[in-house]
Image (cartoon, helix red, strand yellow):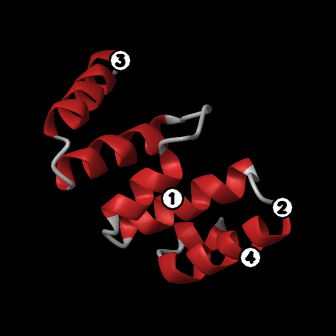
Amino acid sequence: DYLYHADRYAEAEERASWILRLEPGHLAATRLLGLSQFEQRRYEEALKTLSPLKERDRAVQEAIGISQLQVGEVESGRKLLWELSAVE
């Protein structure tokens, strides 16, 4: 997680992938992988990684919404981001 917060997204992704090979479905590693993909502008991959998560904090929800917009899922992305803005 420190790699992600240091803007070292490729390294964070590598670390998360390593953890997931050892423990598939690891929640924190899945979150880290998806957010790292998002920060590297790999929106389709980020959506594939983050969308199945049942526990979604604000960062994950925002990444999903923005990724949806970027890959052409405009209505879904707008709806999610609108809902998030209403919560603030």
Query: Reading the chain from its start, which is encountered first: label 3 or label 4?
Result: 4
- Secondary structure under badge 4? helix
Q: Which mark is residue 87?
A: 3
Give amino acid for label 2. Glu
In the visual, does 86 lie left or right of 60? left
Label 2 Cα crowd, 10 Å radius (few <14 / some 14-19 / many 20+): few
Label 1 Cα crowd, 10 Å radius (few <14 / some 14-19 / many 20+): many
- Secondary structure under badge 1? helix
Relative to 85, residue 8 above or below: below
Q: Which mark is residue 18?
A: 4
Q: Nearer the viewer, mark 2 or mark 3?
A: 2
Q: In this rendered view, identify the residue nearer to me: 57 or 75.
A: 75
Query: Reading the chain from its start, which is encountered first: label 2 or label 1?
Result: 2
Give the Cα distance between marks 2 and 1: 16 Å
Q: Are marks 1 and 3 in contact (CB under 8 Å)?
A: no
Position of the C terminus by quadrant: top left
In the visual, does 76 lie left or right of 25? left
Relative to 75, residue 51 above or below: below
Q: In this rendered view, identify the residue nearer to me: 87 or 45.
A: 45
Give the Cα distance between marks 1 and 3: 23 Å
Looking at the rendered structure, the number of numbered marks drawn on it comes to 4
Q: Give the residue at mark 1.
A: 34
